Image (cartoon, rainbow, N blue to C red):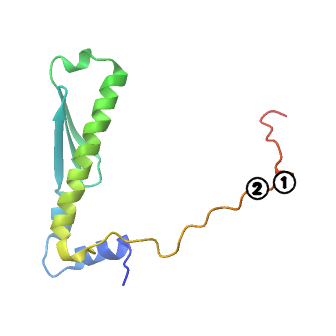
Amino acid sequence: MTRTAVELADDAFAAPEPGYGARLAAIRAAAAGDGIAVVVDLHGALVDLRFDRWAPARSPGELAGVIRRLSAEAGAAALRQGRELLGDLLPDEPRTAARPRRRPPEPDEDTLVPATWAT
């Protein structure tokens, strides 16, 4: 039986062991490197950001890149924590699509019309 994410969440909040909701909400994961430290929640939302004294001397693009990389690392760790917490409520294997995605049909050369942005 394949269950949706909403059904899994409903099961977690209705589980006999109380506190799943609070425990999921409390999940935090951290990652640090290159003078920057981040903490994210289960949803990957940034909840803390810290810089060493020398880190802000980098260009804004470099800072953004490091923050994105660290946030992704911490987000993956937070998801692993959530999966461990929910344990047997989650399926062992990731769900495969119930129906295969269909590719849109290739356009026929006769049906192609040039797009005009300015008229």
**Element at label 1:** helix
Q: Residues within 10 Å of mark 1 (few under 14, many from 20)?
A: few
Residue position marked by numbered label 1 in the rendering: 111
Image coordinates of residue 65 in percent, x first then y, are 33, 30
Image coordinates of residue 79 in percent, x first then y, are 24, 57
Left or right: 104, with 101 as reference point: right
* Disc assigned to residue 68: none
**Element at label 2:** loop
Q: Amino acid at mark 1?
A: Thr
Image coordinates of residue 10 in percent, x first then y, are 30, 76
Disc 2 + disc 1, Cβ < 8 Å: yes
> Looking at the rendering, in which quadrant would you find the N terminus?
bottom left
Q: Is residue 99 above or below residue 30?
A: below
> At 28% from the left edge and 33% from the top edge, which residue is drawn?
67
* Disc assigned to residue 107: 2
Most foreground residue, 113 or 40:
113
> At 32% from the left edge and 37% from the top edge, which residue is drawn?
68
